[in-house]
Image: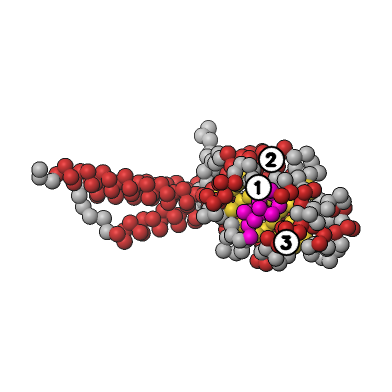
Amino acid sequence: MFGIMAISFSDIGVALTLAAIGGGLVWLTIRSVKGREVPRRLIFAFVFVAVSLPVLFPITFKERMTPTVKAVFDKIESLPPGSRVLMSFDFDPAMAPEVQPMADAYMRHCLSKGHRVVFMSLWATGQALMTTSLDRVVRREFSQKVNGVDYAVIGYKAGNEGVLNVIVTDIRKMFPTDVNTVPLDSLPIFDGVRSCKDFDLVLTTGGGYPGAKEWVLFVGDPGNVPIASGVAAVTAPLLYPYYPRQILGILGGIKGAAEYEHELVNRYPQFADTPAPGLRMMGPQTLAHLVIMAFIIIGNITYFRSRKKEPV
């Protein structure tokens, strides 16, 4: 009896994508080696196809954590259940595609480990994005968690580093209540919490001002509070001088988010079916980079072949 192999529409799409990209590169290589000109518009069209097909037919790759990402993951893993984590949403919709997947992954990881999480923002735009993540992750996937006991939302406060300069010694001076005007003193999660120094970890997500750098200067260093950060790709290089002494770990751009999501699914299989935008966005990005690298190689082959044919 012949076995029946189930082939999904997605598998067909992935096969077509890889065949189109591979076949196109072979055709371009042959054409270039023969010395025939390749129109610039054709190159642009090929890059468009190489990026758009993996979007239509999602392709994901295995990710391995880099040391900066592993340091954040291991820190959350090592904290005992019940540890307090302060998480700040310091970004706007322009940065959200890169940074919000990190915030969602942090939420899933912390709540799965039984940590208690307090959410806040130094950006006015971070308040709405925080609410989106809370609805998508906390209230949908962790409905058994109790507001005020397992997590709390103290929201946005204007003042940039001025806010940090105060909450490092007394959090109630800036946040006397949560977003629902419930006094912090009546919330069990704040029992014994006076300032940022009473949190076991601060997770910052963002990539602008105020952001991870201000958290280090006004909370991490003076309060001796462990700081970890997830930032946009353009910001990550500016934070490496603070790693690992002042920032214990950094997630840089969508690559950092994808590495974290991949490890989270490996350790916690219950998240296998949850959205992983970081992993999904890395498919088009990886293929686009491979295509550009192939173009560079093809161009160099063509150049050196043309030099050999030139009369000495």
Q: Residues within 10 Å of mark 2 (few under 14, many from 20)?
A: some
Q: Which one is nearer the viewer's eye here, 296 or 79? A: 79
Closer to the chain start, of discs 2 and 3, is: 2
Magenta stretch holds residue 133: no
- Work out how far the residue at label 1 is from the one at label 2, CA to CA, in angstroms: 9 Å
Query: The C terminus lies in which quarter of the figure?
Result: top left
Total label count? 3
Q: Which one is nearer the viewer's eye here, 50 or 92? A: 92
Q: Residue furthest top?
A: 1
Which residue matches tag 2? 75
Which residue matches tag 1? 228
Secondary structure under tag 1 reads strand
- Work out how far the residue at label 1 is from the one at label 3, CA to CA, in angstroms: 19 Å
Closer to the chain start, of discs 1 and 2, is: 2
Q: Is residue 221 left or right of residue 65?
A: right
Whole-percent x, y for residue 112 in the image: 74, 44
At 24% from the left and 49% from the top, the residue drawn is: 32
Which residue matches tag 3? 163
- Magenta region: which residues? 210-221
Q: Is residue 217 left or right of residue 85?
A: left
Amino acid type at mark 1:
Ala
Secondary structure under tag 2 reads helix
Amino acid type at mark 3:
Val
Amino acid type at mark 2:
Lys
At 53% from the left and 39% from the top, the residue drawn is: 4
Secondary structure under tag 3 reads helix
Whether residues under marks 1 and 2 lie with C-beta atoms below 8 angstroms apart, the answer is yes
Whole-percent x, y for residue 152 in the image: 79, 56
Closer to the chain start, of discs 1 and 3, is: 3
Relative to residue 180, is residue 12 depicted above or below? above
